[in-house]
Amino acid sequence: MFAVVDIAGQQFKVTENETHYVPKLDAEADASVTFDSVLLYNDGKETKVGAPTVEGVKVEAKVLEHLKDEKVIVFKKKRRKSYKVKNGHRQQLTKIEITKIG
């Protein structure tokens, strides 16, 4: 059994008892979160495709923690102009565990 869910503008293929790193959610750690925007649902026998979402199917998840991703280096340079700029960026993420699909 799996589902394709829209979480904060990104699509994730999720199954039960699986952990995912998603863009930061406005929820406390150890809180339950419900996602209503299920785009595709497969229960092993049949597949339901939403237009745009599947009605009556929800995905429940538990927020495990909030953390930051690895640093991405942004380096800009223009040759022969003595111009160099180095910046870094760390995206904020939320680690969730899928508890129930259905």
Image (tube, rainbow, N blue to C red):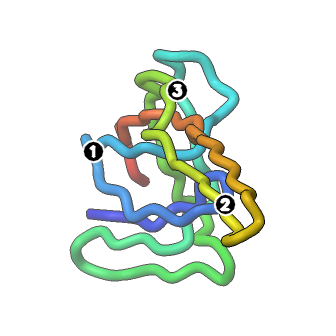
Q: Which class describes the residues within 10 Å of circle 3: few (<14), some (14-19), or many (20+)?
A: some
Q: At numbered mark 3, what does the secondary structure look like: helix, strand or loop?
A: strand
Where 54 sits versus 92, above or below?
below
Disc 3 from disc 2: Cα separation? 42 Å
For marks 3 and 1, the one nearer the N-term is: 1
Q: Which class describes the residues within 10 Å of circle 2: few (<14), some (14-19), or many (20+)?
A: few
| Residue at 43% in and 54% down | 102
For marks 2 and 1, the one nearer the N-term is: 1
Residue type at mark 2: give it.
Answer: Lys
Give the residue number, with chain letter if any, for mark 3.
32
Q: Quadrant of residue 21?
A: top left
Residue type at mark 3: give it.
Answer: Ser
Location of residue 89 in the rendering, given as x and y in whole percent from the top left corner: 61, 41
Q: Look at discs 3 and 1 and give the one toward the viewer.
A: 1
Viewer-nearest residue: 73 or 27: 73
Location of residue 49 in the rendering, given as x and y in whole percent from the top left corner: 51, 82
Q: Look at discs 3 and 2 and give the one toward the viewer.
A: 2
Give the residue number, with chain letter if any, for mark 2.
76
Quarter of the picture containing the N terminus is: bottom left
Give the residue number, with chain letter if any, for mark 1.
18
- Contact? badges 3 and 1 (CB < 8 Å): no
- Contact? badges 2 and 1 (CB < 8 Å): no
